[in-house]
Amino acid sequence: SAVISQKPSRDICQRGTSLTIQCQVDSQVTMMFWYRQQPGQSLTLIATANQGSEATYESGFVIDKFPISRPNLTFSTLTVSNMSPEDSSIYLCSADRGNEAFFGQGTRLTVV
Amino acid sequence: KQEVTQIPAALSVPEGENLVLNCSFTDSAIYNLQWFRQDPGKGLTSLLLIQSSQREQTSGRLNASLDKSSGRSTLYIAASQPGDSATYLCAVRPSNTGNQFYFGTGTSLTVIP
């Protein structure tokens, strides 16, 4: 199975600030995915990140709010910008190995 | 758009019982289906992956089945243990929209010692 290291595991942030979440995969992957899981709900895809090109965002998510970097084939970051309490969620990164998806440990974000 | 539903939303069983978790999806044109486990506040752990051409997959005490034509999958857990307590999510990857998953809302399982 693939190993995906995600950090931080949790953070409490002031509204109006930004948080950058990092994900490191133990092998090269073409695409990495960022999901949000709001309290009591299932996962929603934020964007797909390909190395060397801009991320592709899903409906309802914009680059200004969730900028993503993908500098190489093993690493990606997601920034949650100008945070409000509504951004309090678990954020997860994911990558595929073969046909199987693997996830990082998640980042539990609380905005106060 | 694919809709994925999981029933029941929550389940509580005594230790040792066998149990079945259900997942249904609206569009049978899927590439694969994957079952995950999520512990509170944590990421997802992959349990079983079923390709669209397969009927079932087994790993230890877990068995997952897939009936594409009826839009259903089940996860069977044999001889449940307290350590099985977690939320179980099924996710469907459609065959025609790249690599995006559509997730169910999950079943929260509690195994009582």
Image: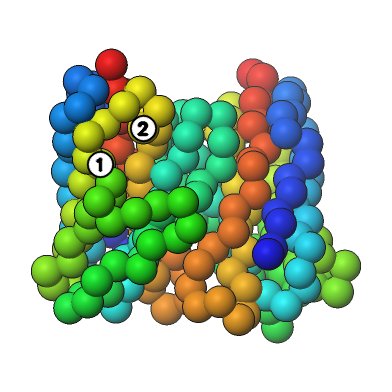
Q: Residue at x 44, y 65 (%)?
A: A101
Which residue is the site of mark 2? A87
Q: Which mark is residue A54?
A: none
Specify the amino acid type for callout 2: Asp
Instruction: Say if labels 1 and 2 share a chain.
Output: yes
Q: Nearer the viewer, residue A41 or A28?
A: A41
Q: Can residue B87 be seen here? A: yes
Is there CB contact under 8 Å for labels 1 and 2? yes
Query: Quick one: which residue is furthest to the left in this view?
Result: A71
Question: Could you tell me residue A20's position as x and y percent?
Answer: 17, 43
Quadrant assignment for the C terminus of chain B: top right
Q: Which chain is home to disc 1?
A: A
**Type of colouring:** rainbow
Q: Secondary structure at mark 1?
A: strand
Q: Residue at x 73, y 78 (%)?
A: B29
Quarter of the image where one finds residue A74: bottom left
Which residue is the site of mark 1? A80
